[in-house]
Amino acid sequence: MSGFSPGFRGRTHAFEGRLPPGQYPTESFPVLSAGPTPHVPTEDWSLTVTSETGESRTWSWEEMTALPQQHPTVDIHCVTRWSKFDTRWSGVGLDTLLEQVESDAGFVVAESYDGYTTNLPLEDLTGNKAWLVHSFDGYPLAPEHGGPARLLIPHLYFWKSAKWVRALRFTTENEPGFWESAGYHDHGDPWREQRYWND
Ligand SMILES: Nc1nc2c(c(=O)[nH]1)N[C@H]1C(S)=C(S)[C@@H](COP(=O)(O)O)O[C@H]1N2
Ligand SMILES: [Mo]
């Protein structure tokens, strides 16, 4: 177990099998943003899903929060090596949103209010394993953590969980996003340590 400080041993043991390779557990919730935090009032917020043919569907805040809500408790893993266990969120399953727009495309680009983008294969967003979340630990999601709403895709490194998301765009071709164009792995599976291009 090299790479762990002794103080973490007990906790690591308690989370046996839940810590991906090269990660350490933390109780804190670090903030990692490429730029300044955008402040988007919920009255001005919307989410648009667009197909590869240009068909689209937009939800206002009121409409989005009226959709069926889910309450996932999940482990999250950042490529900077911290992992946080049993994080509690509320939001809408991405299946619910994506099924409203007809598409034959295999990829999705998430676009955010700060200009950030990240790319995902559709199969990583469907099957009840990805969400648009607006609450963390029972409280409205703080702006620095992506409030009013962000993606939550816990089975991939956390850079894929776009904060301040405003659009999901279906694409036929895979289009690398912000970090994926800058050396991060295209897919980002923490269990396979897909951190950088050559991993
Ligand atoms: N819109 C946007 N989303 C983003 C980022 C960003 O800079 N802008 N940073 C990503 C990175 S690199 C990580 S590790 C996580 C950090 O989320 P947190 O600040 O809530 O811990 O958000 C991801 N989502
Ligand atoms: Mo990150």
Image (cartoon, rainbow, N blue to C red):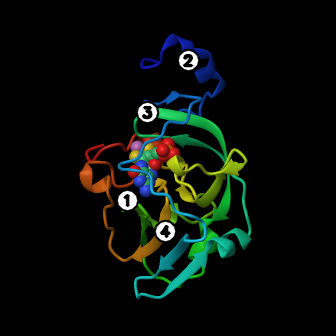
Q: Is residue 140 visible?
A: yes
Q: Nearer the viewer, mark 1 or mark 3?
A: 1
Q: Amino acid at mark 1?
A: Tyr
Quadrant location of residue 9?
Answer: top right
Q: Amino acid at mark 2?
A: Phe
Q: Which mark is residue 81?
A: 3
Percent coordinates x, y for residue 65 in the rendering: 69, 68
At a point 55% along the width and 13% down the height, the residue shown is 7
For the residues marked 3 and 2, what is the alpha-carbon distance in whole angstroms?
14 Å
At a point 53% along the width and 58% down the height, the residue shown is 151
Q: Which mark is residue 166?
A: 4
Percent coordinates x, y for residue 111 in the rendering: 42, 66
Q: Is residue 182 above or below residue 41?
A: above
The mark that comes first in sequence, 1 or 2, is 2
What residue does disc 2 label?
8
For the residues marked 1 and 4, what is the alpha-carbon distance in whole angstroms?
10 Å
Element class at badge 1: loop
Does the numbered disc 2 mark a residue whose Cβ is under 8 Å from ligand 1? no
Give the quarter the ligand 2 occupies.
Answer: top left
Q: Amino acid at mark 4?
A: Arg
At a point 67% along the width and 76% down the height, the residue shown is 63
What residue does disc 1 label?
116
For the residues marked 2 and 4, what is the alpha-carbon distance in whole angstroms?
38 Å
Element class at badge 4: strand
Q: Is residue 104 above or below residue 151?
A: below
Q: Is residue 107 above or below residue 133?
A: below
Percent coordinates x, y for residue 57 in the rendering: 54, 83
